[in-house]
Image: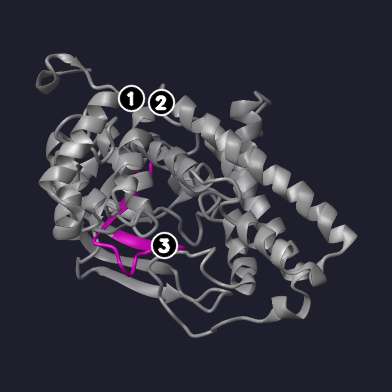
Amino acid sequence: MTDAANGGGPVDAAELRRRTQELLAAHPVDRTDRTDFLKARFDAGLAWVHYPEGLGGLGAPRSLQAVVDTELEAAGAPDNDPRRIGIGLGMAAPTILGYGTEEQKNRFLRPLWVGEEVWCQLFSEPGAGSDLAALGTRAVREGGGDWVVNGQKVWTSSAHLARWAILIARTDPDAPKHRGITYFVCDMTDPGVEVRPLRQITGEAEFNEVFLTDVRIPDAHRLGEVGDGWRVAQTTLMNERVSIGGMRIPREGGMIGPVSKTWRERPDLRTHDLHQRLLKLWVEAEVARLTGERLRQQMVAGQPGPEGSGMKLAFARLNQEISGLEVELLAEEGLLYDDWTMRRPDKVDFTGRDAGYRYLRSKGNSIEGGTNEVLLNIVAERVLGLPSEPRTDKDVAWKDLAR
């Protein structure tokens, strides 16, 4: 793009550094409220530089975001706590950008990025987890006005904190299951929305089940066309898998960091077998990290593809194997657990807790963001080009499917 403020020249790395320094000069980090600074950053187009002007970006290449982030980190500027608002950043925002109206983009993107409004994802259901397209939550339109939604969703991260939710519901039960779905933005403060905690093996209730009873959603909160919700949802799902499996981390970041630190600091725990296993997992973690960097570079040229499913698969397997090795390395210490108190956390903290938490929480990695079995099918069919599995329900109306 070209920039009038830059004499009509392109927004390049030098221009982004200049704009970042202007932001810091106008809003000194040590004298500016955190939320005010984040709002000013969004308005300056430095939130996500590849987004359009006026929506937190400058239409610049996605790869240049690192230029801004590096400058702000060096200055000690606050971030928007991305782990707390990851669903909004990684899933809701790209879907709103791709399918939302101008009014929806202007209403939702700024408070989403700043962190003033937390988002959750109302997709999975008790009878439609791996087979998401079989969902049964119904949305019925009253005349030409609001949609009335009834149903149940499950495994909803952050529902207890969320102001908004991205929701898919069945609007045409006479159509085949993939064609009769519509995508909405749901107000989680609606009196028809009930959030119940789901206590996990960790003792926490980070997930929730959500009951929707006569929830009214205005048609102005629909994303995409009626009945086209499955296509819209694919944007969400592909971005979700990239955000889970393709996070930017430094060398020895993530789960491999704590076990490597323990190995170096506790020579009394070492054995030859554990050494060989740690070396293997360290190399695999580094390969996954570098593959993630390559995936992010590919994303500069367009939307995320099925490669994100492969990264998410690797993320789940590595987390589970590394956390298992860490528990074995610590021997009886690995059996300890810090606190079984029922809590409803606002984020997942893999590296800030003990080995027992990492071991237990990583079991969920092969379920959240798409089960390993579903992702293996996606990789097989869309990456490797293998024949798809036979399907007998492709052209059958949803209402006629066995349930």
How far, Cα to Cα, is label 3 from label 1? Answer: 31 Å
Helix, strand or loop status at disc 1: loop
**Outermost residue toward the right in this view:** 272
Q: If the image is split into quadrants, where does the N terminus sit?
A: top left
How far, Cα to Cα, is label 3 from label 2? Answer: 28 Å
Marks 3 and 1: CB-CB under 8 Å?
A: no
**Residue 142 point in image, percent of width and height:** 16, 51
Q: Earlier in the sequence, mark 3 or mark 2?
A: 3
Marks 1 and 2: CB-CB under 8 Å?
A: yes
Q: Which residues are magenta?
A: 150-174
Q: Nearer the viewer, mark 3 or mark 2?
A: 2
Residue located beneath label 2 in the image: 300
User: Which quarter of the picture shows residue 207?
Assistant: bottom left
Residue located beneath label 3 in the image: 157
| Tag shown at residue 17 | none
Q: Give the residue type at disc 3.
A: Ser
| Tag shown at residue 61 | 1
Q: Is residue 172 magenta?
A: yes
* In the foreground, 252 or 57: 252
Q: Residues within 10 Å of mark 2 (few under 14, many from 20)?
A: some
